[in-house]
Image (cartoon, rainbow, N blue to C red):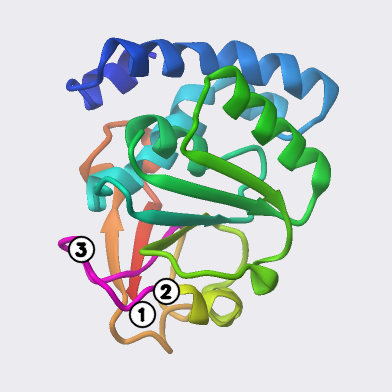
Amino acid sequence: MQRVFDCFPNLTERQRQQFAALPALYAKWNAQINVISRKDMDNFVVHHLLHSLAIAKVQPFKPMCDILDVGTGGGFPGIPLAILFPQTNFHLVDSIGKKIKVVQAVADALELANVRAEQTRAEQVRGEYDFVVSRAVTDLRQFVPWVRGRISRSNYHDLRNGILYLKGGDLGEELQPFKKAKVYNISDYFDDPFFETKKVVYLPM
């Protein structure tokens, strides 16, 4: 966990405690409901926490803004980002109920009042959000239509409202329809071999 603390040195003591509690919480729930592979649990801090928090290096979220995490799975990237930005509202959705059960349990255990977890599909979500975040749920050409109408027109951040998408590998073909997309290499922020091919794709909407 020290790697998280080193990369985000301005954490409060409460935030440090919340991050430190995550490995045991997920180990406990993962034994009951498998939301993280055994290999990834062994590399939990890098593969899940730092990977999720890379979005914060691209665009820190402002208080009272609204973030939608689509296909959150066990709560990534939403839960780590909600710890980092306690005054920002996070709506975490997934179509699989048992995953949302884990997300809700983790949020309750950490007393994350800024997290709302819901079992639903992205296409059924109502409301508007400053940013939609997600972690490699599907090809962006399929993902964008799911959330196209969910982006608020009121902009408060350095980046224009849109999608912040964690993805890896060669994205040339996938991003061809999106001329305004910008790709940030996570290896520029975190020094670990895992991030050599990992990126944050920003797509203004």
Rendered view: 148 above or below 53:
below
Report the amino acid beneath label 1: Met
Marks 1 & 2, CB-CB < 8 Å contact: yes
Report the amino acid beneath label 3: Tyr
Q: Is residue 160 magenta?
A: yes
Q: Position of residue 120 (x, y in %)?
A: 73, 59
Q: Which disc, if any, is residue 66?
A: none
Q: Which residues are magenta?
A: 152-168
State how far apart marks 3 and 1 are (Cα).
14 Å
State how far apart marks 2 and 3 are (Cα).
13 Å
Of labels 2 and 3, earlier in sequence is: 2
Left or right: where 171 falls relative to 106: left
Residue bearing the label numbered 1: 205
Front disc: 1 or 2: 2
Mark 1 packing: few (<14 Cα in 10 Å), some, or many (20+)? Answer: some
Residue bearing the label numbered 2: 151
